[in-house]
Image (cartoon, helix red, strand yellow):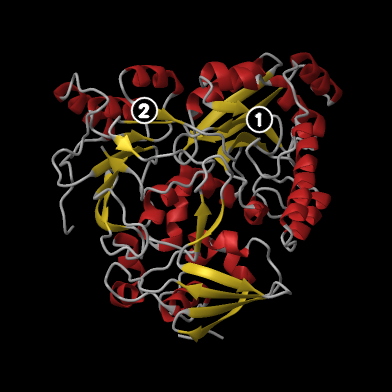
Amino acid sequence: MYGKSRRRSMRAVLLGPLAIVITTATLLAGCSGGSSGSSSTSGQTLVIGSQMASFPSLDTGAITLAGYEGQRLIGNLVYEGLTKRDVSDPNKPAGVAPALAKSWDISSNGLAYTFHLQTGVTFHDGTPWNADALIYNIHRYMDPKDPHYDKALGTYYAVLTYVKDVKKIDVNTVAFELNKPFSFFLADLYNVYFASPASLDKAGSSGQAKHPVGTGPFVFASLNPNQEITFDKNKNYWGTVPKLDHIVVDLIPDPAARTAALRSGRVDWIEAAQPDDLAGLKSAGFQTTGNAFDWEWSWQLMASEKPFNDIRVRKAMNYAIDRKAIADDLLGGTAVPAYQTYAAASLYYNAADNIYSYDPQKAKDLLTQAGYPNGLSIKVGYITAGSGAMQAKSMNEALQAQLAKVNIRVTLEPVDFSGMYAKLAAGHTGWQAVNQAFSLEQPSSWSWIFTCGKNYFEYCNNQFDALRAKALTTTDDAARAKLLTEAGHLATEDAAWMYVVNDTAPRAMSAKVKGFKQPKSWWIDFNNVSMG
């Protein structure tokens, strides 16, 4: 069916993240917003303080285990897909743009996609990107007989389940045949990463997991486990060659420690800046950025288990919380109150679906109607840090306090990112709800969130499933959006989640960072970023 550490750490540090912050802050006390922790390295270096708690495997799809932050700060630097997220206009939701495919043709029945590949592209080891390299990688993901096949990698690429066959037309042209029409095929190819066949033949999957070789704008340089990962500019990059010479990503999951690292000059840029710190950082000469985008921070309610098998209890949860207080007071305006399934920045948002409000008395009445006049007790698992977790501890504790006012007694159970998904996959979590954040930008991936019998949170609405299924085969953009808007309305009416806020991705960075514009997406293009 198918065709066929070279450089030491930039900052020699051997202490844990918090100890580093304290030590560095003492040594560099008085540094201003214009300072940089990269002065000891040649060329332009951007040092990023990440909220990731640990680094994932560096092998293509496995990077997804670190969520969108893993893709943003690791995967998209080293690897590329046939397409990418289009964030060229920071005022519009992300679309689809060419990447390793420069163009494509789609058959009238939606079953055939012919990709015309970028020419003159090489992997970081100097070997060519072409049709053979593409088919080699797809074969690796889909064929159990392939010597580098890894079943786990395939699970990260649900888009490939729609692929029936892939054939080489010529050295720079490949044709995909789908087993059924799939309107998100182009959009979902963005992170089907391609690794060097020569590298895989030499070192296998285990080698790729430690020393990734792709075609991206940056080349993997070094990894200091549980501390930092370093990338160098790909001087031979086929597209816009980066202005930065190096990017270093430091693991600093504690938000206060990230702020301290920025103030001290240890890092130049921090993810998920603490709202309370933004005004002080700005007055000290640092830059702060943010933009509304499709990022849902909610509690997912276990809808088939008591007490949330009763829609009245789920609705009571949504009337019991003061989202505006969370967004404005706790988060300092760095989030937007969420009153429905979709964020206002979503392509599928309809303001008429903002049906919930802060009404504690209504929440109590609903609880009484459901047979809980004295309230109830629940346990909620939440991700402490990592991709899109925002200020998880303080936000969950604030919700805990708000819910207590209507006699909903909440026990919070913190867990790390990988631990959350391990427990969800195993089942029997002991939780009645979970808190995690994610984008609904890819409707094709919603099966694990919403689909009957497949999602982790036990929500089921057959009409929702039917609307989504029809949307997946609808090629007209407006008609598809209408279907998904209708589906979101149903989930909101069902109170599938307790809707809390939508993130604006607050970041803070040195005044020396130039050329960055916050998109309406989790995706970032670093190629035009520089250090002034």
Above-or-below relation of 307 to 219: above
In this picture, residue 197 sits left or right of residue 306: left
Which residue is nearer to you in this view: 146 or 289? 289
The residue carrying pointer 1 sits among few (fewer than 14), some (14 to 19) or many (20 or more) residues within 10 Å by Cα, namely many
Q: Earlier in the sequence, mark 2 or mark 1?
A: 2
Q: Is residue 137 visible?
A: yes
> SS for tag 1?
loop
In three-dimensional space, the C-alpha distance between marks 2 and 1, rounded to whole angstroms, equals 27 Å
Residue underneath mark 1: 338
User: Which residue sits at x=49%, y=35%?
Assistant: 389
* Residue sitting nearer the eye, 74 or 495: 74
How many dots with numbers?
Answer: 2
Q: Eyeballing the image, is 527 above or below 35?
A: below
- Report x, y in % for residue 373: 80, 18
SS category of the residue bearing label 2: strand
In the picture, the disc for residue 287 is: 2
Q: Is residue 116 left or right of residue 343?
A: left
Q: Is residue 373 visible?
A: no
**Residue at 25% across, 35% down:** 16
Is the residue 413 above or below the residue 479 in the image?
A: above
| Amino acid type, residue under disc 1 in the picture | Ala
Looking at the image, the residue that sits furthest to the right is 369
Q: Are marks 2 and 1 in contact (CB under 8 Å)?
A: no
- Amino acid at dot 2: Gln
Quadrant containing the C terminus in the rendered view:
top left
- Give left or right: position of 121 versus 420: left
Q: Which tag is nearer the camera, tag 2 or tag 1?
A: 2
Q: Position of residue 454 (x, y in %)?
A: 68, 55
